[in-house]
Amino acid sequence: MTDEMKKDGVEIPIEDGTEEVIDEAVDAAEETVETAEEFADATGGADAEADAETEAEAGDTSADASADAAEGDDMQAKYVRLMAEFQNYKKRTAKEKEDIYAFGAEKVMLSLMEVLDNFDRALEQGCSDEKHAEGIKLVHTQLMNALKKNGLEEIEALGEDFDPNFHSAVIMEDTDEYESGKVCFVVQKGYKLNGKVIRPAMVKVAN
């Protein structure tokens, strides 16, 4: 059986089986299009996944860099703090050594205070033998000079304004010889060692 189709107003005879060939060609073309679309979708998904992986790797790299920077800042801070502590330690130990050199003899000086007190009492009592009295004064002077070379210094008190940092008042006394608040009598001498009071002067203060 022969069919006919028109093209540009001209009837073209179509032999049997031709329509089937055309249908098969159309089906093949449609399958090709579908395959191309599936390939495009698959390729696009792969590309998207690759992009996501790339972005994730970039994020990981950035995070690692930030972590390294934070760790570096932390180490720098620890180093600065350690150096500051070391400098403070050096200053503290240096001060302790100075104090040992300056005040290491404090106990010895305090024990010698009693000897100086006895010298003062002996000199106040006086002596009928002038040579003996002169000998006591000479020994007292030599002892004081030796102690002064090692930092001992007598605290000025008589006639001075009362200062609780250097003087210890034992009594207030009425007197016309000194103004009110002045030290009018020294009961016991006081001493400083390298500027530090090791025994305040015991005094009477004018009322």
Image (cartoon, rainbow, N blue to C red):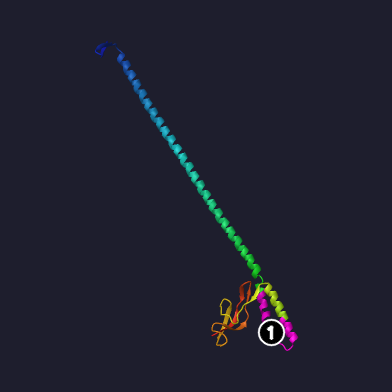
Residue 178 position (above or below residue 38): below
- Quadrant for the N terminus in the image: top left
Residue closest to the eye, 113 or 19: 113
Residue denoted by label 1: 123
- Tell me which segment is drawn in magenta: 108-137
- Label 1 sits on a secondary structure element that is helix
The residue lying furthest to the right in this view is 131
Q: Residue at x 50, y 44 (%)?
A: 65
In this rendering, would 43 be left or right of 14?
A: right
Residue at the image position 74 percent from the left and 85 percent from the top: 132
In percent of width and height, residue 37 lies at: 37, 27
Residue 90 relative to residue 15: left or right: right
> Residue 91 at x, y = what percent?
60, 62
| Residue 114 is covered by the magenta coloring | yes
Quarter of the view holding residue 88: bottom right
Q: Name the chief secondary structure element in magenta.
A: helix
Q: Position of residue 75 (x, y in %)?
A: 54, 51
Residue 203 occupies which quadrant of the picture? bottom right
Name the residue at 33% across, 15% down.
21
Residue 9 percent across, percent down from the top left: 24, 13
* Quarter of the picture holding the C terminus: bottom right
